[in-house]
Image (tube, rainbow, N blue to C red):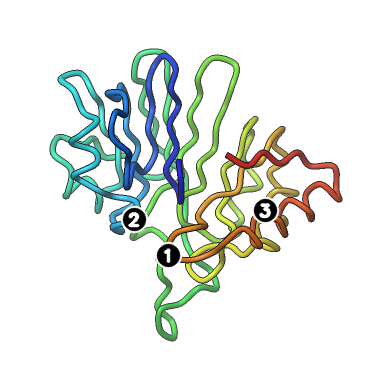
C-alpha cells in the first residue's frame, strides 16, 4: 500500500505498519507494528481498522502508543487463529543519526516479523540494515527496505536477499520520506541478474 504498509486482504485480514491508509479499508483481524516511529506506528490508522476482535501486535515502544497491543520481542511468537507471528531482530549497523547513535539501535527499538499462514511464510524486515540474523531465516516471501539513509540501500538489500534465499522479494520503504523508484529498479536489476525473483507492489 506504500512505504512499509502492507495489507493481506484475505482470511484473515492482516495489516503491517498501517500508515496513511485510504478510506474504505477492511477491518483487520491482525495488525503488526514494527516500531514506534510515526511512519510505522500510527495510532489513528490502527484505530480506524480495528474492530472488537482485532489483535494488535507491536514492539514495546509502539505498544505504549497502541491501546491493548500485545508486545512481542525478538525470539517470541504468538499464534492468532491460523496465523503464527514471530518477532525477529531489526536494527542498524551503519546508519547513524549522530556518531555512535544508530537510528534503530539493536535490542532497543523495533521488530521484523515472520508471518506463517498456511504453506506461506512472509518476512517483513522492518527498519533494518543487513544483519547476521538474516542468515537464519527460512521464508518464502521477503519484504526488504531499499531506500538507504535509515535502512538498507538497494545494494545492501541485494546482499541480504542472497543470504535469505526466499522465493520472492518485495522492495519497500521508498516513495515517501526517503527513497524512490531508482532504488527499486537498482534492487530489481541486481536481484534479477542473480536469478532472484522480485515483485513490486
Give the spatial CA distance, label 1 vs label 3: 23 Å
> Most extreme residue toward the bottom, as rendered?
99
75 w.r.t. 42: above or below: above
The residue closer to the viewer here, 89 or 176, is 176
83 w.r.t. 128: above or below: above
State the image coordinates of residue 146 (x, y, percent, origin top left).
59, 58
State the image coordinates of residue 189 (x, y, percent, origin top left).
79, 54
| Image marks 2 and 3: residues in contact by CB distance under 8 Å | no
State the image coordinates of residue 83 (x, y, percent, origin top left).
42, 20
Give the spatial CA distance, label 2 vs label 1: 9 Å
107 w.r.t. 195: above or below: below
Q: Residue at x 67, y 38 (%)?
A: 199
Q: Is residue 114 left or right of residue 188?
A: left
Asked where in the image residue 15 lies, by quadrant, the reply is top left
Say which residue label 1 marks: 177
State the image coordinates of residue 20 (x, y, percent, origin top left).
32, 47
Amino acid at each position: 500500500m506504500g512505504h512499509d504498509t502492507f495489507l493481506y486482504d484475505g482470511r484473515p485480514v492482516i495489516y503491517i505498519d498501517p500508515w496513511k491508509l485510504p478510506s474504505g479499508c477492511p477491518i483487520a483481524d491482525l495488525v503488526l507494528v514494527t516500531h514506534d516511529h510515526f511512519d510505522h506506528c500510527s495510532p489513528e490508522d490502527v484505530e480506524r481498522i480495528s474492530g472488537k476482535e482485532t489483535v494488535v501486535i507491536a514492539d514495546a515502544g509502539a505498544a505504549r502508543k497502541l491501546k491493548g497491543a500485545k508486545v512481542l520481542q525478538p525470539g517470541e511468537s504468538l499464534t492468532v487463529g491460523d496465523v503464527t507471528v514471530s518477532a525477529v531482530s531489526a536494527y542498524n549497523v551503519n546508519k547513524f543519526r549522530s556518531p555512535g547513535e544508530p537510528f534503530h539501535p539493536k535490542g532497543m527499538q523495533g521488530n521484523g516479523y515472520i508471518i506463517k499462514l498456511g504453506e506461506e511464510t512472509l518476512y517483513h524486515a522492518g527498519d533494518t540494515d543487513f544483519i547476521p540474523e538474516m542468515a537464519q531465516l527460512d521464508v518464502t516471501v521477503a519484504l526488504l527496505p531499499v531506500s538507504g539513509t535509515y535502512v538498507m540501500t538497494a545494494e545492501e538489500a541485494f546482499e541480504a536477499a542472497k543470504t535469505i534465499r526466499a522465493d520472492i522479494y518485495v522492495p519497500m520503504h521508498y516513495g515517501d520520506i526517503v527513497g524512490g523508484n531508482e532504488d527499486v529498479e537498482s534492487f530489481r536489476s541486481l536481484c534479477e541478474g542473480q536469478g532472484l525473483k522480485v515483485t513490486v507492489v
